[in-house]
């Protein structure tokens, strides 16, 4: 730290300032990081890397989503790369949600999902899951399912949130089944329904879904393991 700090003090090199800011972020020296990236964002308002790092810091670490919104809105106006635009929109929608402006976030999420479904959901969903904001995520999924043609991925994520994180296994099963209607040959969905039935104590139903999973993919390792684990519990019955 000291070597880089001293070098940055004596040399006006924005690239090194950015590296030092990233180091500060990594080692949770958030005030120092904020000072560096705030100055860089003013000095270089169109630089994607400096401003995204600044926004991530404001959103994820020091809880200043309103400030992040202003920074991201400015950056969005100046960005031309579609990849950059998708990333900015993902963080902007997240900042709106954390700033209790969901009505502004939802249309951005919907548009981003149509343009780049993997990136738009990965950043947003991972943040909400990692920070245990499950109700926010369920609300987003409900909005998207009601305002788009529907996605097996979204129904599957809803099922996963309900089963794995909120332990509402009975509510998870209909979500997984809606995903199956859109993607009927997906072994993991059958396995997930089986797990929910298992958690509800419905062992024979669980076994039915595990068998259905391996009927689609005979090498589906999780389902094979689950069948082996359940075999003795259902007294050797083959469903």
Image (tube, rainbow, N blue to C red):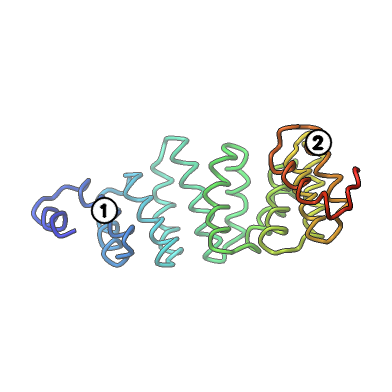
The residue depicted at 45 percent of the width and 58 percent of the height is: 69
Which residue matches tag 1? 40
On the image, the x and y values in percent for residue 36 come to 25, 58
Looking at the image, how many numbered discs can be counted on the residues? 2
The residue mark sitting in front, 1 or 2, is 2
The image quadrant of residue 213 is top right
Above-or-below relation of 143 to 166:
above
The residue depicted at 35 percent of the width and 51 percent of the height is: 51
The residue depicted at 82 percent of the width and 46 percent of the height is: 177
| Residue 128 placement, left or right of 39 | right
Q: Quick one: SS at disc 1?
A: helix
Neighbourhood count class around disc 2 (C-alpha, 10 Å): few under 14, some 14–19, many 20 upward: some
Q: Which mark is residue 143?
A: none
Question: 24 or 10, which lies in front?
Answer: 24
Above-or-below relation of 57 to 118:
below
Q: Quick one: SS at disc 2?
A: loop
| Residue 239 placement, left or right of 154 | right
The residue depicted at 71 percent of the width and 33 percent of the height is: 219
Which residue matches tag 2? 184
On the image, the x and y values in percent for residue 34 come to 30, 62
On the image, the x and y values in percent for residue 154 come to 69, 47
Q: Quadrant of the N terminus?
A: bottom left
- Cα separation between marks 1 and 2: 50 Å
| Residue 74 placement, left or right of 191 | left
Q: Quadrant of the C terminus?
A: top right
Q: Determine the residue located farthest toward the left in the rendered image.
A: 10
Question: 206 or 3, which lies in front?
Answer: 206
In primary-sequence order, the first of circles 1 and 2 is 1
């Amino acid at each position: 730290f000291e070597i880089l700090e001293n070098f940055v003090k004596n040399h006006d090199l924005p690239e090194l300032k950015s590296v030092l800011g990233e180091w500060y972020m990594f080692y949770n020296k958030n005030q120092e990081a904020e000072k560096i990236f705030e100055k860089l964002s003013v000095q270089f308002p169109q630089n994607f890397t400096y401003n995204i790092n600044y926004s991530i810091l404001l959103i994820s670490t020091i809880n200043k989503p309103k400030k992040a919104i202003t920074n991201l809105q400015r950056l969005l106006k100046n960005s031309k790369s579609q990849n950059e635009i998708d990333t900015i929109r993902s963080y902007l929608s997240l900042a709106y949600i954390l700033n209790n402006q969901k009505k502004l976030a939802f249309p951005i999420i919907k548009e981003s999902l149509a343009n780049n479904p993997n990136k738009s959901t990965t950043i947003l969903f991972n943040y909400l899951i990692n920070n245990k904001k499950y109700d926010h995520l369920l609300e987003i999924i409900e909005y998207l399912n009601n305002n788009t043609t529907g996605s097996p991925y979204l129904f599957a994520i809803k099922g996963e949130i309900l089963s794995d994180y909120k332990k509402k296994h009975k509510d998870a099963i209909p979500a997984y089944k809606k995903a199956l209607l859109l993607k009927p040959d997906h072994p993991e969905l059958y396995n997930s329904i089986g797990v929910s039935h298992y958690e509800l104590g419905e062992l024979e139903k669980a076994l039915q879904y595990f068998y259905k999973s391996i009927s689609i993919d005979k090498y589906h390792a999780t389902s094979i393991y689950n069948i082996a684990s359940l075999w003795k519990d259902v007294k050797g019955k083959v469903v």
